Each structure stands twice: as structure tokens, then as C-alpha cells.
Image: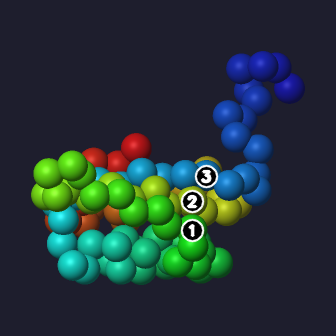
Amino acid sequence: MSEQDKPLLEFPTRFPIKVMGARHDEFSQTIFELVRVHAPDIVAEDIELRISSGGNYVSLTVTVTAISQAQLDDIYRAVTGHPMVKYVL
């Protein structure tokens, strides 16, 4: 296998996904549930929450144990498609 054909990630791997949106009481729980559909082993401790200095936005870092690129793609599609979400990194 050449360097070009080598996958970018080796699975399984712990992979952080940063999700940002307007501050809303249900934001964290909603994102947790969206991700859990594709990564059923996540727990509340896998989510780190930060509130913006102005208090208007929230940033979540959701760390999943990814088992494939397809799983990560599914998570990104689910999260980016939700109306509460502004950005996903």
C-alpha cells in the first residue's frame, strides 16, 4: 500500500467533533442524542461544554470512539443537518 492509499485515520480511534450553536436549554441533549444514534457507546462524560464569553453561544466537543470513516461521515451529516447547529469541526 502506497502512502497515498493509506487511510488518514486508523480505526478504532477516539475522535473529537466540535459542534457550535446558539445557546439553548436543549442543545447539549439534542446533540448527544443525534450522535448516539451513530455511536451508541457515548456517555455524558464524552461531551465537554463551553459557553461563549457573551453567553449567547455554546460549543460542545463530543469525543466518540470511531470505528469507521463511514460512521464519522454519518455523525457529521446528522449533526450538520440539525437547525440548532451553526458549525461543525
Q: Which callout, 2 or 1, points at the residue further toward the start of the chain?
A: 1
- Does residue 62 lie above or below 1 as drawn? below
Contact? badges 2 and 1 (CB < 8 Å): yes
**Exactly how many numbered labels are in the figure?**
3
Instruction: Tell me which amino acid carries mark 3.
Output: Phe
Asked if residue 13 lies left or right of residue 47, the reply is right
Contact? badges 2 and 3 (CB < 8 Å): yes
According to the image, label 3 marks what residue? 15
Any part of residue 83 in sight: yes
From the image, which quarter does the C terminus lie in? top left
The kind of secondary structure element at disc 3 is strand
Q: Where residue 20 sits: x, y (%)? A: 29, 54
Instruction: Tell me which amino acid carries mark 1.
Output: Asp
Disc 3 residue crowd, few under 14, some 14–19, many 20+, Cα 10 Å: some
Query: Spatial distance from mark 2 to mark 1, Cα to Cα?
Result: 5 Å
According to the image, label 1 marks what residue? 46
Q: Residue at x 42, y 51 (%)?
A: 18
Q: Residue at x 52, y 78 (%)?
A: 44
In front here: 77 or 59? 59
Query: Spatial distance from mark 2 to mark 3, Cα to Cα?
Result: 5 Å
